[in-house]
Image (cartoon, rainbow, N blue to C red):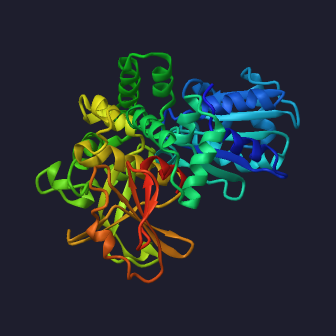
């Protein structure tokens, strides 16, 4: 079993007084069902799993009468159970396929006899048919692919080693050179394997990377199947957008250029297609800001954006043929550093940091800007050897409310005389 941070979150939820239902969002195959199943079986006398895609007949429990008594009786007649007060967790999986079950959560939580977890892969897309959201009766969280720390756990790295790396990041103290070198090697593995559980398990179980690539291709195929099944009239545009992500990230400024997909394309035409991928958890939007001032949302220019994949391993498998060997050999600046920058975007997103970049008419470019302790912090990703050349970052030292200025690179920890912090790129997980 892969150790996941979500387990701690689930345990914390279980111990809350007067708990609400827990809704776990996330892209398909990030491990939601597995971790909920393991948690439920280990922490409840009765664990009842209802998957509305695999068991569509269960939807009939939510027709007409949505009173808890009626719903539970119908589920019991369908063979689900046993239902024991105070000792039962009911798990509604793929709940996007049964909108009325989401509506019924309010009444089920009010009933108070059982605990409820909901999960689904396309929640943001398929809930247009929900008649009434259970506002006030539901806590939401998102599950992501394994981050680098979870990958290190899977590789058997001791928690004390990770704590040492975390402390070095916090105190801006150089790591032992041997530890830094090994952490960088492991991060290079992580870049090409990514954090999808099936790919990580394949990598751990076989020295043949072909198995890892096969697992990644299978996941990508399932995403394309979802697009065909759920994207309705926009499925063609969604597929075009999805397939264009690797090539677009190869551009020097990484910005998503619609004209590269379709001549004369307008942003409005592709707006829904892009949002579909974001709501499915497959991609992350990184919006341009026109001024280095907080709040950044006041200066967002949402028609200018970068589009990152939620997992670097899938990015490599999707569009970069034979890149894996080069990355393993330390060439993480390959393809204009797209994979390294994507890894940082994924780490920031998983830590709840909104993605924004700054670009002033292509004369001054900053990879990531974000608010931190009421100040503006800046990240530049420099995956090559010239990581100390950063003209745009040098120009920011006079900004009001300036926070940290960070360069993520292959080098060990260092702090310059003018306050720029150089961190190994694998420390993005701590930001």
Foreground of the two, 394 or 312: 394
Foreground of the two, 63 or 160: 160
Residue 215 pos. (x, y %): 41, 23
Q: Residue furthest right?
A: 85
**What residue is at 67 percent from the left and 53 percent from the top?**
134
Taking the image as shown, residue 135 lies to the left or right of residue 171, namely right
Residue 355 pos. (x, y %): 42, 60
Taking the image as shown, residue 25 lies to the left or right of residue 112, namely left
Q: Say which quadrant the N terminus sits in.
A: top right
**Count of numbered marks:** 0
Residue 104 pos. (x, y %): 69, 45
In the rendered view, would you say 384 is above or below 376? Answer: above
Residue 154 pos. (x, y %): 57, 30
**What residue is at 72 percent from the left and 50 percent from the top?**
106
Q: Residue furthest left?
A: 263
Foreground of the two, 397 or 345: 397
Q: Is residue 65 visible?
A: no
**What residue is at 17 percent from the left and 48 percent from the top?**
261
Q: Residue furthest front?
A: 177
Q: Is residue 317 visible?
A: yes
């Amino acid at each position: 079993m892969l150790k996941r941070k979500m387990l701690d979150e689930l345990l914390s939820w279980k111990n809350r007084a007067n708990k609400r239902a827990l809704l776990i969002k996330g892209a398909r195959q990030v491990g939601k069902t597995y971790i909920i199943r393991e948690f439920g079986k280990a922490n409840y006398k009765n664990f009842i799993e209802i998957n509305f895609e695999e068991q569509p007949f269960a939807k009939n429990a939510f027709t007409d009468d949505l009173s808890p008594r009626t719903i539970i009786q119908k589920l019991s007649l369908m063979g689900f159970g046993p239902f024991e007060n105070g000792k039962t967790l009911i798990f509604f999986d793929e709940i996007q396929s049964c909108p009325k079950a989401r509506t019924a959560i309010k009444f089920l939580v009010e009933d108070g006899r059982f605990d409820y977890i909901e999960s689904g892969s396309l929640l943001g897309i398929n809930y247009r048919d929900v008649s009434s959201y259970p506002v006030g009766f539901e806590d939401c969280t998102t599950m992501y692919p394994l981050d680098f720390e979870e990958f290190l756990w899977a590789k058997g790295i001791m928690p004390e080693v990770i704590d040492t790396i975390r402390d070095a990041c916090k105190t801006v103290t150089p790591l032992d050179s041997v530890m830094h070198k090994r952490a960088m090697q492991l991060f290079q593995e992580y870049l090409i394997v990514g954090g999808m559980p099936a790919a990580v398990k394949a990598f751990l179980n076989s020295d043949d990377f072909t198995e890892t690539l096969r697992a990644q291709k299978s996941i990508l195929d399932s995403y394309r199947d979802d697009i065909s099944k759920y994207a309705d009239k926009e499925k063609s545009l969604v597929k075009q957008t999805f397939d264009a992500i690797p090539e677009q990230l190869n551009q020097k400024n990484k910005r998503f250029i619609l004209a590269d997909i379709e001549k004369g394309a307008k942003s409005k035409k592709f707006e829904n297609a892009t949002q579909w991928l974001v709501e499915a958890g497959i991609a992350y939007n990184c919006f341009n800001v026109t001024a280095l001032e907080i709040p950044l949302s006041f200066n967002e220019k949402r028609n200018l954006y970068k589009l990152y994949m939620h997992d670097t391993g899938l990015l490599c498998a999707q569009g970069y043929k034979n890149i894996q060997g080069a990355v393993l050999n330390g060439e993480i600046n390959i393809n204009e550093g797209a994979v390294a920058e994507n890894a940082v975007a994924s780490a920031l997103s998983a830590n709840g940091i909104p993605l924004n970049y700054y670009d002033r008419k292509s004369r001054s470019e900053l990879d990531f800007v974000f608010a931190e302790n009421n100040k503006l912090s800046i990240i530049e990703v420099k995956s090559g050897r010239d990581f100390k050349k950063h003209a745009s970052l040098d120009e920011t030292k006079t900004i009001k409310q300036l926070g940290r200025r960070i360069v993520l690179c292959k080098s060990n920890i260092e702090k310059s005389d003018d306050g720029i912090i150089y961190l190994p790129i694998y420390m993005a997980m701590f930001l």
